[in-house]
Structures are given as structure tokens and as C-alpha cells.
Image: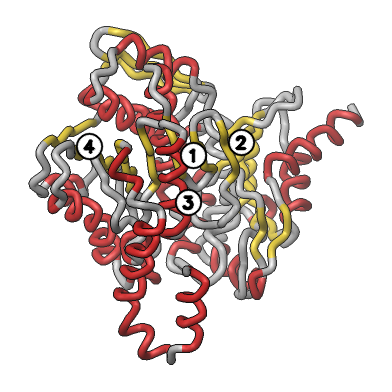
Amino acid sequence: MEKILRLARKIIPKKIFKALQPVYHWLMAFLAAVIYRFPSRKIFVIGVTGTKGKTSTIEIISAILEEARFKTSLTSSLHFKVGRESWKNEYKMTMPGRFFLQKFLRRAVKEKCQYAVLEMTSEGAVQHRNKFIKTNALIFTNLAPEHIESHGSFEAYRDAKLRYFRDLEKSREKRRLAVVNEDDSAAPYFLKFDIPQKIKYGLKDVSNYNLQKDGLSFILDNIEIKSKLSGLFNLYNILAAVAFCKTQNIGNETIKKAIEKFQGIEGRLEKIDEGQNFSVIVDYAHTPDSLEKVYETFQTSRKVCVLGSAGGGRDKWKRPEMGKIASKHCDQIILTNEDPYDEDPNQILLDIKSGISNDQFPNSNFEIILGRHEAIAKALSYAQTGDAVIITGKGSEPWLMGPKGTKIKWDDRETAREELRKILSTK
């Protein structure tokens, strides 16, 4: 059915199709729900939305629920999971299409999962990918400029996220709750809806929090909790997960056990260790705000930074901002290719370079290396004892996306490991 609808999309003139797009997307969502027999009615569905931290929050929620002996399923930009079975998300799409989601939920129900935790995006809201998915809980992490060109404005981007909360407000489902980061400036927009249970979380919930390069700790309800995750942003992700899990009557001791067992997330501030005497970090950071937070986590280290952007054909406004942030925090910068799609990768890098002030950042510490493998190798060759080599933009994504839909198998982490072994073998 989905193939038939996609064929119709190609046949119908673009102007007519654009006018009919909302109907098209709604119809796709309805047909998917009918075919898979509305599976969300038989499982507790949690949606996580926001600009950053969605994947991490989802993984932490799942870890706590599983520690409490619940069976979970999840969808994220990283992978899909039903019970103990997990498979990588290779769609280059954080929130897959309606038929995938309904089929996924049907599988989760069949496997007797009690919870489904779904990453929900602004594009997903616009395209009605969530329609006919009965949602019980929504979690808002934070809001920062992203996908501005796609939505037309920051306000339109924010309003797309708000659609999820509006739908939850209108839902007839009795079990409904919203969990909102009250420390974020956009919190009032997400708290305004008439939802039976609204939970606010923030730094007020903890005391004596301590952030280090290799982890963090905090006091929650007079219990000290230590995590292997780093950075203030990960503390917020933990707090979002904790706030939700407490509504499910999960006790602090179970929460503590789950958080302290949690090893981290692929491609999210992931440490690559082959026995070298400096740090190597691979992170997905693809917005100015997330990039700055990654750099701040290693503010006491000399930083060698491998930087791309958010790929071709999107969010051009943020390219010089990324360059500006890198010049503020990094000691050595290498600009390199990321996902150019149909855009000239050299132009993308020049756009980033435009944000790097020659007056404030020495030319001798800056270079452009188009080949990503070569760029990573060069960055590692510059590293000295105690340095941090920070490779951002791709995380654990498995492809480099090129023109006309072409893609090359890729993994920043494996590339870093390969080059580290070469360096160490010569010593």
C-alpha cells in the first residue's frame, strides 16, 4: 500500500501534491494503523521530543524500566529494540515512516513489551507520523535552533514539537502525562496544555552534582548516584528519565542501580581507547549548542577538533556558528567532509570557515582536509599526552551520504581505532 501511495506521489503534479500533502500523510498514517490493527492501544507509549538528548534519554529510560523488570521496546536515531533483540537504524531518519512504526509497535505487542519509547521529531509531527499512535507520556528535553530552513522559522520548528503535546491534550486516553525540562526557556510553551499529570524536572531535583571528564555524580533524595556519562547535558538526560520513571512507581534504589550500570551510548560522547595517552571522543553533536557543550566537557584539555557540519542542503545558517564555536574552544581545527548530499562539500567547509576569525585563531592551527579518514588520521597524529581529540558530527552513523542518494559505509569510531593502532604500533 505504501508503495502504491508513493507511486501516486510521483504521478500527481507537484503543485497539486503539495496542496494535498497533509491529506496524503494523514492517509498513510491511517492505513498503517489499520493494517497493523492499532497496536499502540495495547502498550504504554512514551514519546521523547526536543532538539538534543532524545536518544540518550530514551536509552536511560529503557535501562531503568528494565532494571525494574519491565520489558521494553524503543526507536531512536541509533537503533531499534524489542525486548532483547536490537538492530541498527540505518535509515538516516530519526523517526521512521508510519508503516515502520505501526509494524514495530505490533511486534512489540506480540513480544509482550509493556513499554514502547519512541524518539519524536519535528518533521515527524509535520508528516503525521505519530497519528493513530496512542501516546501515554511525552517528555520534552530542550529546544534550540535546528531545521530552521525546513520549517521556515524557529517558531514553526517549535510549533511542530508542540503538536505532540496538543495531540496528547486532545487524547481520550486516561493515562496521560507530560514531563518537561523546566530549566529550558521554552518550558512554558510545553507546560500550557491541559494534560492530567504534568511533571517538571531540572537541576533543583539534585544537589552536590559533580561533572568530570570521565563521569558525573549527584545526590537524589539523599542518595548518591554515580554515572559513567559526562557533561551537564547528560545530567539533564538522566533527570528526564528519572522524572518519568518515578511516575511509574520505580524506587530510588532501582533507579540508582540502573544509572550506575549504564555504560553509555554509541557515538554519544563515546571514548575510543586503544591504550593511547590522550583522549579520543566521538560525538554526534550537530547543532551549535550541542557542539559547545561537548567542548565545554573537556575545557581543561588541549583540544584537537575534527569538525564537519550538519550536511548538505540544510541549516546553512549554523555553519559559520559551528566554526565560531570551534575557534573559541579548540587549539587545533581540522574541517572535513560530513554528509554533503547534492551540495559541493568544499562550499560547505568554506561556510564553516567563514565563522573562524583569522584575528582570533592562528592559521597555523587550522586546515581543511576533505577526506574524513585522512582528517581523523591527521588529528590523531597531532595529539600529545593529555590532549583530547574530539571528532564530531557523525557519532555512530553508518554511512557518509553523497550526491543522488549515494552512500559510503562509514564509522568514525572504527576509523579512529584503526589509526590509533597504526600510531601505537610505531612506538
* Mark 3 crowdedness (10 Å alpha carbons): few <14, some 14-19, many ≥20: some
- Residue marked by disc 3: 325
| Disc 1 to disc 2: CB gap under 8 Å | yes
Contact (CB < 8 A) between labels 3 and 2? no
CA separation in Å, label 3 and label 1: 11 Å
- Identify the mark at residue 179; answer none if there is no mark: 4
Type of amino acid at the residue the image marks with label 1: Val
- What separation in Å lies between label 2 and label 4 (alpha carbons)? 30 Å
Other residues around mark 2 within 10 Å, as few (<14) / some (14–19) / many (≥20): many
Disc 4 crowd, CA 10 A, few/some/many (<14, 14-19, 20+): many
Pointer 3 or 2: first along the chain: 2
Q: Mark 1: few, some, or many residues within 10 Å (few <14, many ≥20)?
A: many
Q: SS of the residue at dot 2?
A: strand
Place of residue 228 in the rendered image (x, y in percent of width and height, measured from the top left): 50, 21
Of badges 3 and 2, nearer the viewer stands: 2
The quarter of the picture where residue 260 lies is top left
Q: Is residue 331 visible?
A: no
Residue shown at 17%/43% (left/top)?
Answer: 173
Mark 2 lies on residue: 281
- Name the residue that disc number 1 marks: 294
Q: Residue at 64%, 57% (x, y): give it.
A: 335
Name above or below for residue 14 compared with residue 203: below
